[in-house]
Amino acid sequence: MEANEAMELKEQAEKGGDESRLRPVAFTMSVLAVMVAITTVLGHRTHTDAVLKQNQATDQWNLYQAKKIRSSDTALAQDLLSVMMIADPKAAEKADKIAKAYKDHQDKWADDLNDEQEKAEALETKVEQAEARADRFDLGEALLEIALVVSSITLLTKQRLYWYLGLGFGLVGVLSAASVLLLK
């Protein structure tokens, strides 16, 4: 065997050794890529949920506002009927009936307005909760992407320090995404 052939065999053996040492890094990168994809999908769904809940809250506030305007208009009509002087006794009796009906509506609508307001506020709370969950997923996604990139530097530099650093970022990213479970 010549000296050149021996050197080539030695270089190939060293390359093969590097490849086997880098297999855990490549596997880690694959796992990180899958976790990035999962976290991204969960984050997008959570953002969509927040938008849908915001639409529901807006609709609920619109219903509240419509009932409030109706109640205000009825109160104005009731006030107007109470100060009007009607000479005709039949017309006065009819005006009193209308005023009483308006008062009954006002009493009913007062309860309705409270219910509508409570529903709208409950939906706004759900929006805030969905946005908080989405923020956690976004942070987890960003940290997992950083972990993937930092781990890939290991393949270029052959220094395991980057792999360990990537594992650290990945762990924090997973914890951030999993912290969604702790939110109410």
Image (cartoon, rainbow, N blue to C red):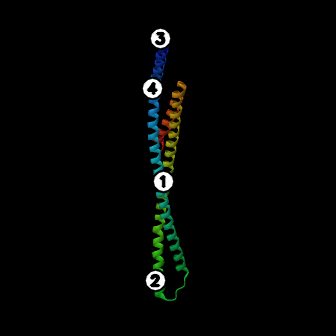
For marks 3 and 1, the one nearer the N-term is: 3
The amino acid beneath tag 4 is Arg
Instruction: Find residue 95 and report its horizontal and vertical position in percent.
Output: 48, 82
According to the image, label 1 marks what residue? 51
Quick check: marks 3 and 1 in contact, CB under 8 Å?
no
* Residue closest to the eye, 154 or 128: 154
Q: Is residue 122 visible?
A: no
In percent of the image, x 44 and y 33: which residue is there?
31
Quick check: marks 2 and 4 in contact, CB under 8 Å?
no
Instruction: Report the Cα–Cα distance between label 1 and label 2.
Output: 49 Å
Instruction: Find residue 134 and report its horizontal and vertical position in percent.
Output: 49, 46
Label 2: which secondary element: helix
Q: In the rendered image of this protein, does residue 56 appear above or below residue 75?
A: above
Instruction: Report the Cα–Cα distance between label 3 and label 2.
Output: 121 Å
The amino acid beneath tag 2 is Lys
Q: Which mark is residue 135?
A: none
In percent of the image, x 48 and y 77: which residue is there?
99
Instruction: Find residue 156 and report its horizontal and vertical position in percent.
Output: 53, 28
In percent of the image, x 46 and y 71: which residue is there?
105
* Residue closest to the eye, 53 or 71: 53
For marks 3 and 2, the one nearer the N-term is: 3
Q: Residues within 10 Å of mark 4 (few under 14, many from 20)?
A: few
According to the image, label 4 marks what residue? 23
Instruction: Report the Cα–Cα distance between label 3 and label 1.
Output: 72 Å
In percent of the image, x 49 and y 63: which residue is there?
62
For marks 4 and 1, the one nearer the N-term is: 4
The amino acid beneath tag 3 is Glu
Q: Which mark is residue 2?
A: 3
Please name which of the two marks, 3 or 2, marks the residue nearer to the observer: 3
Please name which of the two marks, 1 or 2, marks the residue nearer to the observer: 1
Instruction: Find residue 20 and report its horizontal and vertical position in percent.
Output: 45, 22
According to the image, label 2 marks what residue? 94
